[in-house]
Amino acid sequence: MNAIDEMAAAQGVAYMDGRFMPLAEATIPILDRGFLRSDVTYDALHVWKGRFFRMQDHIDRFRASIAGLRMSLSHTDEELRDILMECVRRTGYRDAFVMVMCSRGVQPPGTRDPRLCRNRLYAYVTPFLWIANEDQRRDGWKLILAKTQRIPSEALDQRIKNFHWLDLTMSLFEAYDQDAHTTVLPLADGTITEGPGYNVFIVKDGALASPDRGMFEGITRRTVAEIAADLQMRCEFRPVRVEELDTADEIFSSTTAGGITPITSYNGRPIGDGRPGPVTRRILDLYWQRHEDEAYTTPVVYDDP
């Protein structure tokens, strides 16, 4: 794909440090520490049928990540909401993927002192993104346990959303080398963490479990736990051993980019009968039903009715 094709493919609207523009025109300074040092945090939201899903929960989590990296923005929550709303309104998209980022910014010449940077707000909106294609959503993902270990929380607090993705990225090459779709990364203690851009749940004897360390605490993960409570199903956030994946009745992933994705193969072996399981299907259905609930959604005001 040449540069012209790449710009044409960048459909959407961006907000770059005070200015709205077409996404294809959005750039950041090459000296921004967000690019040079991955010194940036972000949050990912989505709009479905013209309504943001759990918008304030995402903004609250974004604020926590900013504070965790000792950054600051002058924007109020209302101003953040207005910027994201305006990005979506300008696209007209009823189903959209929304990114909001806080970068450390550009440091003065001759210093590496991060305190001297002006932190910058960036955001963009694209058509809704599915982490899995249609066939994968129907039939399920092929998952492997990566040999690549997740960066430990002692080195980087994974509860702060970040772009330190090289461990996740290199694990994907492992999956592709084995004709699989994706991975889950372990820690040195024999527990699992997360995959590239999603949390992992196992189902055993009707109960759910998801790792409680070395991973990002997803909003979709939180939604799954709330759905499980409504269904009176046990759902635990706890250490999940690698061995538990081998004996799980069902496995699925959760993420903003597509919600719930069944996992029907693990390390080359089918899980159960090799099809999405009943618990996964039930949670998937209820997850999307929540998008019609005004208690969880915020409408976008578009130019046209």
Image (cartoon, grey):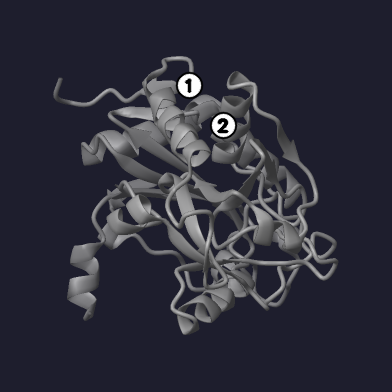
Which residue was labeled with disc 2?
223
Horizontal and vertical percent position of residue 48: 33, 33
Left or right of 302? Residue 201 is right
> Mark 2 is on which residue type?
Thr
Q: Quadrant of the C terminus?
A: top left
> Mark 1 is on which residue type?
Tyr
The residue sitting at the bottom extreme is 177
Q: Nearer the viewer, residue 305 or 116?
A: 305
- In the image, residue 87 sits, relative to residue 40, either above or below, namely above
Tell me which corner region of the image, top left, top right, bottom left or bottom right, holds residue 31.
Answer: bottom right
Is residue 100 visible in this depiction of the protein? yes
User: Which residue is drawn at the image coordinates 58% and 75% (left, top)?
Assistant: 171
User: Which residue is drawn at the image coordinates 52% and 73% (left, top)?
Assistant: 268
Horizontal and vertical percent position of residue 191: 78, 61
Q: Nearer the viewer, residue 67 or 109?
A: 67
Horizontal and vertical percent position of residue 139: 36, 55
Left or right of 16? Residue 235 is right
Of helix, strand and loop, which one carries label 1? loop
Tell me which corner region of the image, top left, top right, bottom left or bottom right, holds residue 53.
Answer: top left
Which residue was labeled with disc 1?
296
Residue neighbourhood size for the residue with mark 2, other residues' Cα within 10 Å, grouped as few (<14), some (14–19), many (≥20): some
Q: Which mark, by number, is residue 230?
A: none
Q: Nearer the viewer, residue 221 or 7?
A: 221
The residue sitting at the left extreme is 304
Give the mark nearest the N terminus, 2 or 1: 2
Q: Quadrant of the N terminus?
A: bottom left
Horizontal and vertical percent position of residue 156: 77, 61
Left or right of 25? Residue 188 is right
